[in-house]
Image (spheres, rainbow, N blue to C red):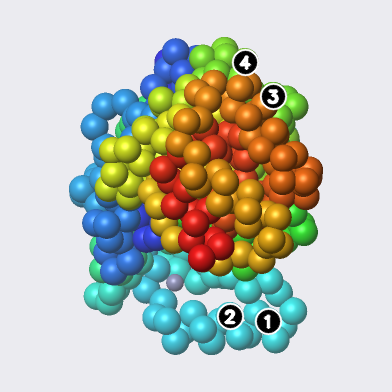
Amino acid sequence: MVITRFAPSPTGGLHIGSVRTILFNWLYAKHCNGKFMLRIEDTDIERSKQEHVQDIYDTLNWLGLKWDGDVVFQLKNIKRHQEVAQKLLSEGKAYKCYCTQEELAAMRELSVKEGRTPGYERKCRDLKQELDKPYVIRLKCPITGKTEFTDLIQGHCCIDNEHLDDMILLRSDGTPTYMLAVVVDDHDMGITNVIRASEHLNNTYRQKQIYDACGWTTPEFAHVSLIHSEDGAKLSKRNGATTISEYEKMGFLKEAILNYLIHLGWNKSEEEILTIDQCIKLFDIRHVRSSPARFSMPKLLNINSIYMRAMSNEDLCLALQNFAGSDKYDHAGWERVLAGMSELKSRTRTLAELETMSAIYGNDGTYFGKIEADEATKNLFKNIIEENNWPDDIESLTAWLNEKIASHGKTLKEVAPAIRMALTKEKVAPSIFELFKVLGSKIVAKRLASSIA
Ligand code: GLU
Ligand code: ZN
């Protein structure tokens, strides 16, 4: 059975690139009828925070990417990591290295001076006797030959063993290194496919050597490229939002984010809308492109607006209440927002934009302030304010209003900007007939009156 995993270190917010990696792990597991596991790599005690662990749970739950089985905490497996290191030691596949930090630094300096690649030059590898000094455990790595594997995304990967030094498995305080912990845990969890960020590609050679030394089958690897910003640089705070919670706050729907991330670097058209079930069926990790994916805000906005328009007005109103807080407007205000939703959603791309524009309906007779208007327009406003017998349906209302405008010697084109400004204080808003209909005579009268007071 295929078993994939997401193995975050809980040291910060979840990056949008990590969400893409999670998604690929999840999709691939579902596609193969396998399992998707979650392992929290909390061995860095100083930097690991419970709030980040919670953030990981919350994000996975919000996105609907549920993991199978219990969460594995790496810190709890330390004894097992130590046991594996000791076993390699007793089998002669690892050795004790007694070099101090100072000695290592001096050796490094010498290698640089003499033009060699700096790295541990195996001083203790063939020591005959044990010393009564603190030590680390290093793996006896192969000195000649190659280490190679075929990555499902990056293709054939190969390195000459002479470029890798004898890596540390266990530090002198007995704690395992990332290299050892990740291999032991992946093995013990039965992980068949390691799908992770491409920044770990170079670690894979070392991890392969640990698998080999332990006599374990190596999982299949798939290294997912980074997400770059539109200008080609690595996505960072400076050129776009990076954590998933920032996108949530910007008012993106999770379905749209997922749909966008699925397509990013996959061989499907980026603006094609697929259901999650279709994605599960179609997804193959081998089809993910190896080149860095390019993040495009206009495309994400476009997908989000497609999703918003596809939602029923009621559902979108609920989503907006969750986003903005249902106490933002009173009951009547929310009713008006719902009544005007069709036009609101065709003019906005995110929940945040929708929230902004919804204020024209949600607030009641908010005083929007004075506007510039000529005498004829003012008279038209006064005339409308006095009327309280408006037609109900939009067609008669349109005819009625057009007639009023004409009777004051104006055209719709001339007065529409003033009316829109008086009713919404915005230059871009739903059509004025729609505004009249949704706001109703009382609120329209209040706003028109305050605009010419
Ligand atoms: N904990 C590592 C990280 O967050 C990932 C380890 C892995 O996927 O192998 O970068
Ligand atoms: Zn040494």
Q: Does residue 28 lie above or below 298 as drawn?
A: above
Which class describes the residues within 10 Å of circle 3: few (<14), some (14-19), or many (20+)? few
Pick whichever, 199 or 324, lies toward us. 324
Please give the residue where the numbered disc 3 appears in the rendered image.
272
Q: Does residue 284 lie above or below 450 as drawn?
A: above
Position of residue 163 in the picture relative to residue 382 (left or right): right
CA separation in Å, label 1 and label 3 = 53 Å
- Tags 3 and 4 touching, CB below 8 Å: no
- Mark 1 or mark 3: whose residue is earlier in sequence: 1
Please give the residue where the numbered disc 4 appears in the rendered image.
282
Residue at 51% in and 65% down = 453
Residue 177 location in percent, x, y? 38, 58
- Mark 2 or mark 3: whose residue is earlier in sequence: 2
CA separation in Å, label 1 and label 4 = 51 Å
Q: Tell me the element at label 4.
A: helix
CA separation in Å, label 4 and label 2 = 50 Å
Residue 112 is tagged as 1
Answer yes or no: disc 4 within 8 Å of ligand 1: no
Residue 108 is tagged as 2
- Mark 1 or mark 4: whose residue is earlier in sequence: 1
Residue 427 location in percent, x, y? 66, 54
- Tags 1 and 2 touching, CB below 8 Å: yes
Q: Which tag is nearer the camera, tag 3 or tag 4?
A: 3
Amino acid at dot 1 = Val
